[in-house]
Image: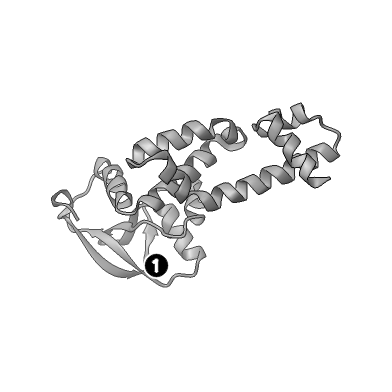
Amino acid sequence: MTDKHQDLEEREVEVVSLKPFFEDYSLVSVFGKLQELPYLVCAATPEGDFVVFHESVWRVLLDRGMEKVRALFYKGVWDLAELFYLREELFRRRKKALVEFYYLAYKNFYGEGFYRTRAKVIQTISQKAGITKRTVYAYLWRHLKEEKEELRRKAMELSSQGKTQMEAARLLGVPRQTISDWLKREV
């Protein structure tokens, strides 16, 4: 930990003994796809131990059946601004996890329109993580491969429903030539 975080101590805790402090269910799907999760940040109170950052990580740990985990506990007073700074610091030590987190969070945020903005998202992630776009792509190869297969499958489905290549391209947010190439390979 940096000097700024000397008020934290790392210790093992039983996952089921923790209670959420914030309601942030919206990121469970994002954290659930990460192989390497960031630390839980907790605060001990007279009422028990609370997860103050990130409830979604805690829920993923419960879903994965984890019994014990290393967590960071505040020794004294904490504030909300410090939590957001801390998230960045914890992830920066693990660039790949940071890149995956940002990518899945952006994908979750944009929903169906994500593929149209993916190049801009990659650029933004590159800047936020302080690495090249090439490295971002390298870290995300597994996600990108799965997405390509899913898009190809959807293109085939749209074609079988009678949609033109242009309609499928517009609906999926990919170039028409890509749709054409995928359809040619299926023949």
Q: Residue at x 74, y 39 (%)?
A: 155
Residue 13 % position (x, y): 32, 69
Where 113 sits versus 23, above or below? above
Q: Nearer the viewer, residue 25 or 164?
A: 164
Residue at left offset 35%, top offset 50%: 95
State how many labels appear: 1
Structure colour scheme: one colour
The spot of residue 184 in percent (x, y) is 79, 40
Q: Position of residue 62 (x, y in %)?
A: 47, 65
The one nearer the camera, 35 or 95, is 95
Q: Is residue 26 left or right of residue 84?
A: right
Query: Residue sitting at 27 percent across and 43 percent down?
Result: 85
> If the image is split into quadrants, where does the C terminus sit?
top right
SS type, badge 1: helix
Q: Is residue 127 left or right of residue 178?
A: left
Which of the pair 181/97 is nearer the observer? 181
Image quadrant in which you'd find residue 61: bottom left
Q: Residues within 10 Å of mark 1 (few under 14, many from 20)?
A: many
- The quarter of the picture where residue 39 lies is bottom left
Identity, as a three-letter code, of the amino acid under mark 1: Val
Q: Mark 1 sits on what residue?
A: 15
Q: Residue at x 80, y 46 (%)?
A: 186
Which quadrant of the structure image shows residue 15? bottom left
Residue 144 lies, with reference to residue 9, above or below; the image says above
Quadrant holding the N terminus:
bottom left
